[in-house]
Image (cartoon, rainbow, N blue to C red):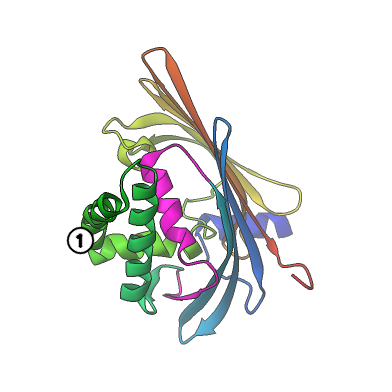
Amino acid sequence: MLLAAIVLQASVALFSPPIDVPLRVVTERREDDRLYRMERHLRFLREGEGYRAEVTLRSATGDTGDVSGALYEAGFGALSGHMLVFHLDRSGAVTTIDDMPALWERFCQRAASSAAERRSLAPSERQKLAARIATPLRALPPERQRAMLASFALAVIADETMTPGTTPVRLPGRAIHGGATSLDGTRTVVALPDGRLRSTTSAAAEGVTLDRVTEVDPRTGLVTRASKTLRIRSGGLEKVSITLLAVEPVADGN
């Protein structure tokens, strides 16, 4: 009966995070022999009818070959050691971010300088290139800026319906692999013995396959573990990207 009640709650996507409990969130992205790893600490607090999420980036190391991914990761590295404060509504959606203009400027500067440093240029030319790269980043609409920064917190919040069973899915290509072609496949959700739910998605389009597994605690609405494997084939070559996410309470003393 208890498991049935948990499954019923999960189907309506309740968000009820643990309050004032520090969580350790580790993200890894692998491409061939390259690895990018980010560790951050996250804490949810009550705030009015919603929540406040405090996130501190503890470390960001490694390098990946994908240009856009490298820019994204380098920009996040500029926020290391800073506490980011997000304000969420009762459903877990980010409504505002403290000091967002300053955070975004720091992000843009680091992303641009990192990209320019990859080129074999004289220092003066490298500075000019960094300025050119930073310009379109600064010009992104505020909602895009907010979405990128909000991923620090939103990555751990379940964003899919977790109703047990198998259903067909169509995933937008731009969000999955940057292309226009949607991916078609299936999503299967099963209940695990410990009360969590596991969602397994397999989808494909021409030259692209996606396999994604997400485990969610329906009592909190938080992801506990996730993996995503994306394969893109073109001209006889295959590019494989594997992203892993793990969420757990912070151990004493860490």
Say whether residue 193 is left or right of residue 120: right
Q: Kindly indicate the quadrant of the structure image that contains residue 173.
A: top left
Look at mark 1 in the image and give the residue it sits on: 139
What is the quadrant of the N terminus in the image?
A: bottom right
Relative to 169, say whether 251 is above or below: below
Where is residue 201? Give x, y as percent: 51, 36
Residue 73 on the magenta segment = yes
- In magenta segment, residue 95: no
Instruction: Say which quadrant the C terminus sits in.
Output: bottom right
User: Measured from the top left, where is residue 89 in percent x and y?
Assistant: 42, 75
Kind of residue sitting beneath label 1: Ala
Q: Say if residue 213 shows up in the picture.
A: no
Residue 84 on image: x %, y %: 48, 74
Secondary structure found at label 1:
loop
Residue farthest bottom in this picture: 48
Q: Is residue 68 in sight in this rendering?
A: yes
Region rendered in magenta = 63-91
Q: Which of 46 and 248 lies nearest the eye of the viewer? A: 248
